Every structure is written in C-alpha cells, then in structure tokens.
Amino acid sequence: MSDPRVRREIALRAAQIMYAREESEYFTAKRKAARQVVGSERVRDLPSNSEIRDEILLLAEMLEGDARQKELTAMRLVALKMMRGLRRFRPRLIGSVLTGHIRSGSDIDVHVFTDSLGMLEDALAEMGLSYLVEHKRVHKRQEQRVFTHVHIEGEYGIELTVYPLDKVNYPFKSSITGRLIERAEIGELEELLRERVADLEGELERADEHVDAWEMFSLLLMQLEKVKQNPKYHPEGDALYHSLQVFDLARWVRGFDEEFLLAALLHDVGKGIDPHDHVAAGVEALEGLISERTEWLIAHHMEGHEYRARTLGERARRRLEESGWIEDLVLLSELDEQGRKGGVVVPTVEEAMEFLRGLGEEE
C-alpha cells in the first residue's frame, strides 16, 4: 500500500517545482519530485494532477496574498479587452484567469474559433500586437493531434488556442480534473468583472490611456522582422534590419533629437500591419503615442523621396515646404535610402529603446 504522507510530500514538492517554473508539465514535475523525496520515480501511487494543482494554489495564496486578487482583476481586464478585439472569433476565456487560481507567471488562456488562421493573424496585426504561432503535436491515447497556439506578448502573456468553427459548442474537458472546462464568453466575463470593478468601462478606458508607449514601439518593431522586402529596393533584407540601420544613422547626425530619432526608427512600422498602405497603418497604430512632428515625418516620409527626386506635384511641394519641417523630411529621406546595406552592425530594438529613454530622462 502507498504511504499518504509520502504522497503528500511528493505533491507539495511537485507544486514547488511547477510554481518556480522549473517544469511546466505535471507528468515531469511529479516524477522529478518523487526522485527528490524518495530517491526514485518508481513510486506505486504518485499524486494526481489535481492534487498537485491544489498544492500550487495554496502555495500561491500563501506567498502572494492580497496582491494576487489585484493581479487577477488586472489580468481579467486585459483578457476582456483582447476578447472584445477578437469578437468575430467567438472567444472564450478558460483556465486560471477565469477560475481565479492564478499564480506568478500565469498566462491568459483563450479559445478562439475560425477556419482561417490568416484572418486571425490579420486581426492581431490590426490591433498592433506581436505574436508567435506554434503548431504543437500531442500524443494522447494512441492518437496524434496538432494544436495551434498563438502566443501574444505583453504585460501578461496571452495564449490563444485556435479551433475550427464547428467546435464552438464542443464540451472540452480538463486534462487535470477530467471535468468539463469552465469557460466564459465576453458577456459572462463582463459580469464577473463588475463584481469587483464598479466602473468597468471607465477602468478599461483608463487602462488604454496608460498604454506604455515604449512597449508598443517594441511590439510594432518586432513585427517587422517577418516583413521581407523587395530586394531590388531593399537588398539589406527584412524591414526591422532596415529600420535599425536608419535609426543608427540618425543617431550620428541628430543624436539629441528624440522626435527625429523616433521618426527614423518607426517610419516603416506600418509594414507589419498593412504592407499595401504602410504609411497610413503606421500613423494609425502610433496615434497618441508620438509628437505632432514625429507623426508628420512618418506620414510624409514617402513624399520626401518624391520631393528630393523632383517628381512631386507643385501643390504638394508647397504644402511640405510650408510645414516648417521640410529640412527634417529631406534628411529622413536621405537616411532612409542610406539604410539599405547588408552586413551592417545595428543596435537591437532593446538598445534603441534604452537610448531613446535616456534622452527623455536628460530633459
């Protein structure tokens, strides 16, 4: 017969392992715990996933206390905002953010339903989000299945699991408890939030007002790494490498001009959203996050090339010249053309952000 005391010790140790993110799978965590507790994973009666989960929640409550409730509300607000943006994909919140059993490092888990992954990716791009698609093979009950997950970066990690439309009402079961998974649609999550948030819409608006501009810049820039450009005009490669070249060149000539440097760095971010009209897409994504001058330079950087080539119409030329920023636009155009070389060493996105933040702190 198994020893209940040893079983509990293994469950507690496995919980500590998973809470510390040493392992992410119950299967491997409980065997690792068994080796540490009794010296071998050959234990007749290992604790169940559900027992380990209960220990994780007790540990989280003990270590995180009241802060966990504030974190839970913040995560639910992020989930609601995301689900509203993806309304057409019938989103359902599942997992610890719904049940309240979050712990340090918990993700926001959402099921979405579509027969077109491309449509979902387009929607995420329109929202200005950086994401990674993962196709995960799982072997279960002598059957191999492929699950599509979309990982979204941000203050809280979000994992979308993509299912076909005919699975909208499918009764999903928990691999931990074997019971039906709790899930909430948009309206149900709104009702849950109103129990703790008196002014839900106001809270969402205030969250929008405090968008971290630097985080948004980074997210928009990282999408450019996937944008491969026409080698005839851009032999250097992807749009991120190009943007970092232009920024680095700008540092040499306008090292203390934060507005100009931002325009140099962000002028092509729209290519990661809408390559057919990257100027308008970029300006829209950056609205409210940059100064009028930076926005103007980005909005007109393509016209800057025509201005220098003298192919721009007379009325458009006068309009640019009357702005007061035409010299900046000409310089940006020149740097845009110079930043198209292969093999050039450029700063990382993080280094560019750090440099720009430093300028702001000096003011």
Image (spheres, helix red, strand yellow):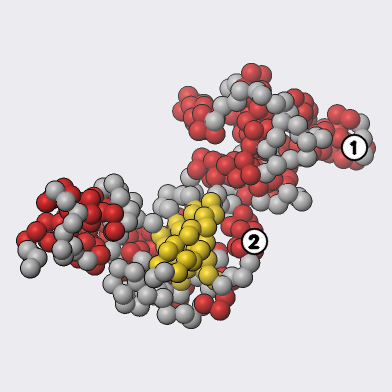
The amino acid type of the residue labelled 1 equals Leu
Whether residue 229 is visible here, answered yes or no, is yes
Q: Secondary structure at mark 2?
A: helix
Crowding at mark 2 (Cα within 10 Å: few <14, some 14-19, many 20+): few
Which mark is in front, 1 or 2? 2
* Whole-percent x, y for residue 208 in the image: 49, 55
Q: Is residue 22 left or right of residue 165?
A: left
The amino acid type of the residue labelled 2 equals Gly
Crowding at mark 1 (Cα within 10 Å: few <14, some 14-19, many 20+): some
Q: Is residue 138 left or right of residue 127?
A: left
Q: Residue beneath label 2, please? A: 118
* Residue at 62 percent of width and 31 percent of height: 244
Q: Secondary structure at mark 1?
A: loop
* Residue at 59 percent of width and 52 percent of height: 128
* Whole-percent x, y for residue 355 in the image: 52, 27
Q: Quadrant of the N terminus?
A: bottom left
* Whole-percent x, y for residue 288 in the image: 59, 47
Q: Residue beneath label 1, please? A: 312
Whether residue 54 is visible here, answered yes or no, is no
* Residue at 58 percent of width and 57 percent of height: 124
Residue 195: mark: none
Q: Are marks 1 and 2 in contact (CB under 8 Å)?
A: no
